[in-house]
Image: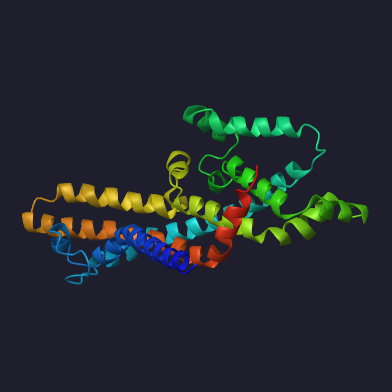
Amino acid sequence: MDIQLKEDKILNIITSIILVIITLIAFYPLYFVFIASFSDPVSVSLGETWLFPKGINLEGYKNILSEQKIWTGYANSLVYTVIGTILNVVVTMATAFPLTIKDLPGKKYIMIYFMITMFFGGGLIPTYFLMKNLGLLDNRLVMIIPGLISVWNVTIARTNIQSTIPDELIEAARMDGCSFIGCFFRMILPLSKAIMAVLVLYYGVGHWNAYFSAMIYLSDTAKYPLQLVLREILIQTELTLELIQDNEMARKSMENVELMKYGIIVVASVPVLILYPAVQKYFVKGVMVGSLKG
């Protein structure tokens, strides 16, 4: 018995050491980007900045935050993320719940139809014409409606509902006169907080990082999300750098560009870093329960 306990302790120590090493490996790139965003760019390029910031330089952040387009992009991304995520979660849960009903007519064929969309798409050009015919070109809704639902997330939500909410509970509510819509709002949603938190994180991060749809379908810069605004700023800065003839000025501008690159990563990551701790306690539970059975 003592030998078994000793072996368990050794295994726990080894596992903990491995997990700490993996955590440090995963965390260090984020930490390096953070300290490099306000360190001397020369020190960063020479590899002298790797554990602590060296030669504090906030010019990158000053240049980023002085751009009015950044704040407009932040506001746009927040609107797209908040409204889009709410609609995503509601539509996903509303789609997943009927698929858990055993006697739903044609349920098998509905799932096959959903699965086909995961493997085949119309392509960029047909999709562009579709958005045009729907009147979504240069429309803020193009950032929300085309990605309103994810088949993969519907599958996760359906599996979660089947795993955590007994069919007998729904049947009892139905016998008491509760409609399917009533069951959805009074039972399914309150009992599915864990998987909804997972969906919020998945959809929220997706909306926050979205830029390709805006680049293709939006032409008004006032409607650009943050990611596309930051991309435009970097491109404009690099183009301006190519036009500078003075070597000293070019060197300073290049340093500012390097600072801005790291600063932009930090600025764009802040909302996600704030969101994750808020849903962390539900995240593991929701993912594990949603993966128990299909």
The answer to whether 25 is drawn above or below residue 127 in the figure is below
The answer to whether 26 is drawn above or below residue 157 in the figure is below
Residue 116 pos. (x, y %):
60, 29
Residue 17 visible in the snapshot: yes
Q: Which of these two is toward me, 149 or 10?
A: 10
Q: Identify the image quadrant of residue 72.
A: bottom left
Q: Which of these two is toward me, 176 or 203?
A: 176
Q: Identify the image quadrant of residue 99.
A: top right
Left/right placement of residue 147 relative to residue 183 reads left
Left/right placement of residue 100 relative to residue 119 reads right
Residue 222 pos. (x, y %):
45, 53
Q: Look at 53% across and 52% down and name the residue there.
A: 202
Left/right placement of residue 38 relative to residue 278 reads left
Q: Look at 72% across and 29% down and name the residue there.
A: 109
Q: Identify the image quadrant of residue 215.
A: top left
Colour approach in the figure: rainbow
Residue 30 pos. (x, y %):
33, 60
Residue farthest to the bottom, as pictured: 56
Residue farthest to the right, as pictured: 176
Residue 68 visible in the snapshot: no
Q: Look at 47% across and 51% down and name the residue there.
A: 223
* Placement of the C terminus among the 4 image quadrants: top right
Residue 70 pos. (x, y %):
38, 59
Left/right placement of residue 89 relative to residue 46 reads right
Q: Which of these two is toward me, 70 or 4?
A: 4
